[in-house]
Structure formats: structure tokens, C-alpha cells
Image: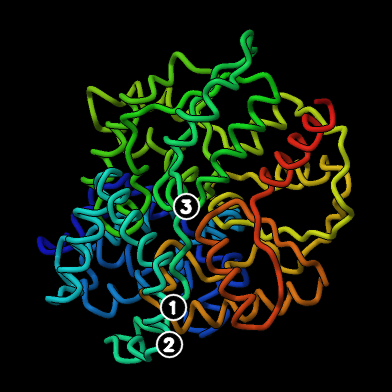
Amino acid sequence: MNANGLNLLENLDYSVVQQCMHCGMCLPTCPTYDATLLERSSPRGRIAMMRAIADGDLQASKVFAEEMYFCLGCLACQTACPAGVDYATLFENARAEVERQGLLHSPVRNFVRRWTLGWLFAKRSRLHRLGRLLRFFQRSGLQTLVRKSGLLRLMPWGLGALEPLTPEINERFTDQLYRQDLKKQNPSAAKYQVALLAGCIQDIAFAEVNADTICALQYNNCEVLLPETQECCGSLHGHNGELDTAKRLARINIDAFNAEDLDAVIVNSGGCGSHIKHYEHLLADDAEYAERAKQWSRKVRDIHEFLVEIELQTPECKLPAQQVTYHESCHLKHGQKVSDAPREVLRAVPGLQLIELTEADWCCGSAGIYNITQPEMSMQLLDRKMGHVRATGAKIVATGNPGCAIQIAHGGQRAHVPVQVVHPVSLLAAAYRAEKQGES
């Protein structure tokens, strides 16, 4: 072994690296290989590089590092793989080693990573403070002024072109909605007790989705808790080479939720859910938390998955007739293996007609922060997605991940496809609320 090689890959169970049979079944499912036809930009090619570096036959280099970050991490290859290769673990450890060796370090990149991953997303209270500032910027007229002034064109590294991807910040965040309105609506004799992961961006820009999730759970006889000391799930950190921070956040959340006392830990974000379902792998070597992490992972449920498991109550109130199509979050389908349940939720809503989307499980290009780090490839994937959306004729796109929602909403503006992007559970909650209003 090369003493300067990939320590994090060397420390993996070597059978994980060896599992890849180089059969090529992953190739047609990989968006970056499809776009480039380069072997190194395929899952098979990336794993070959990881193995060669772990064996000491190849030196880790900037080319390897750039390839690891060109990968979307969509995990479509993992679904297609007949050998069951754990690509997610390989991918995360490879990126962590890229960061350990500093293969892509630069003053600007280092500053951005320290500010975002090391500071902002390390504590939800900081994100809340930034959210309030962003809300003032958006609602005060300053955002409109900046957009009209042309200042965005002067921003470095093409960041001005990404400004439309900034989500609209909610007036109230999840904890405020819960304390002021939702907590008192918990059923008095609930059949299930669950707790909700509020998320980060979900918490400040999609708080209404969290409120809809709580509403749907309460209608289905669940008492919903919202642990006050929960933090970011750590998926951004885990997927971007900051495994130590991801582990620290996992421990905080395990302590905050006490999952062993719950029927389920509920998550409504595909990316967050994929990460927190694998806390048991993340903390497998932690003597204090390994067993609790196993219990945690057994309790985590995507909202659609859980509602179907407990036989969700079909709303009696019919919504106005409308067509909806469904885009699958990569980490919901490939990371969590949840694909049919969101469709079942949508079909349970009277008045909705579900139209299947061609390549529904093909990545939209959001992929965490991929639309920031790889904007050209991200927009290429988005344009492909919006072409399929246009072909459905549907005016509503349902998706179970905030990153996908932001990306597709931007795609609608970019491609002049007028669509409303919603979470499936929001449509279900709307029907439940209409039913309650009809009864009152």
C-alpha cells in the first residue's frame, strides 16, 4: 500500500471495493457517463480509480478529486448494480480523502467550505439568523432592486446566474408553526407517537411542507413531536467530505430524538432521509453510539413510506380536478428505495390525475449543491428534465425533496414551462384540511 494513498479507502472493508464486477450495468443509469461517454466519469471507472489508489497502483491527484466532485452522487448506479456495490460509502469516503489530502484546496474554496459546512450548517440557529436576513432582503424590495441594477452580472465565478435559485424564505419557521398552531392539534388518544426532522433549508424555506407533514400525520392518528435540540442531519457534510462533522451532528440528533421511545422518526426530504437512515453505518465504529444508531436507523421513515405502512386515511373531500406528474428524488428512490409510496399518496387524493413522467428517476441536476459547484452539467440535466415535464402537459410537479423543488421551479422559469412544484404530502394535507372545513 502507498503510505500516501487513500487512508479512508484503505480502512474500508476491502470487499466493498472488490465488489464491483465491472459488468457495466451501471453505465446507462449514470447521468455523467451518459453526457460524456468517458469511462472515468462512470461509477465503474470511479470505483476502478478508488481501488487502484487503495492498492497503491495510482497516486491520488487533482484529476481524481475533480472526478469525485463531478459525480452527482445520485446513487442510480447502486440501484442498477447486480452485485450490490455500496457506492454511497465508497463515494463519501473518496470525497473525504480528497479533502484530507487537500487536492482541490484554494483560498476561496477553503473559505466557502469553512463558512458554509464548518459554520453555517453546523448549527440551525445560525441558519435561522441568516434566513431572517434573507427574508428582509427579499421582502424589503432590495432583492428586486439588485436584480434590476445589473449588479448580479458583476459577481465572480458566475454566482450571479445562480441567484434565481435562492429559495423564498418563510415568514415563520417550523418551530414557530409547531408551537403556535400545530402542537395543540395533536390527537388526545393517538395510536402512534412520532417525531419530525425539521431539516435545514426545509425548515426555513419549506416550513409549510413541514406543517403539511404534521397535519397529515395528525389526521392519521399520530402525535407529532418536534425535538427542540435537533440539528442539521449532516447530509451536506457527509456528501462533501466532512465526515467528522457529519458524525457529530448524527450524535446530537440521536440524543435529541430518543428514537427508542418513538414509533418512527419522520423525514420528508429525500436527501436528508437517505443520510439519516444510514446513521448506523456512519457511527458503526463509535462504541457509545453504535447500538443507538442501529435503533435510530430502524425507526427512520420517509413520510410517504410511513403513511402507506399505517394505511393512510383517504380524504373524503375532492380537490379541483387537476393533472400532476411526479419527479423522483434520487435519494428517495435510490438511497431509501422508496418509489411506489409517493405515488400511492398522490393517487389517494380525490381529484388528482397522476401522469407518469418519462425518466422520472433521472437526476434533475440539483444533487445537494451540485447546481452551485457544477452549474453547466446541472443545467444540462435540468433542461432534459423540463422537456419531459412539458410533454406531460401537467401544471403541477410533485417531488419529495427541497433541492429538487428549487431546481425544477427554476427550470420552469428557464424553459418557460408554467408549473407549480409541490410536495406530495402537501396535496394530501390540502384535501384533509378541505374535509375538516366541510365538516365545520
Q: Are marks 1 and 3 in contact (CB under 8 Å)?
A: no
Q: Amino acid at mark 1?
A: Thr
Q: Amino acid at mark 2?
A: Lys
Q: Is residue 9 above or below residue 220?
A: below
Q: 211 and 217: which one is in front?
A: 211
**Residue at (57, 61) in percent of width and height:** 405
Which element carries disc 3, helix, strand or loop?
A: loop
Q: Which residue is mark 1?
A: 144
Residue 410 in the image, given as x and y percentages of width and height: 56, 73
Q: Marks 2/1: CA distance?
A: 6 Å
Query: Position of 369 compared to 23: left or right?
Result: left
Q: Marks 1/3: CA distance?
A: 17 Å
**Residue at (24, 54) in percent of width and height:** 120
Q: Amino acid at mark 3?
A: Asn
Residue 183 in the image, given as x and y percentages of width and height: 52, 24
Q: Which residue is mark 3?
A: 170
Marks 1, 3: nearer the viewer: 1
Query: Position of 309 compared to 277: left or right?
Result: right
Q: 411 and 262: which one is in front?
A: 411
Q: Is residue 401 above or below residue 387?
A: above
Image quadrant containing the N terminus: bottom left
Count of numbered badges drawn on the protein: 3
Residue 178 in the image, given as x and y percentages of width and height: 48, 31
Q: Are marks 2 and 3 in contact (CB under 8 Å)?
A: no
| Crowdedness near tag 2: few (<14), some (14–19) or many (≥20) residues, C-alpha within 10 Å | few
Which element carries disc 1, helix, strand or loop?
A: helix
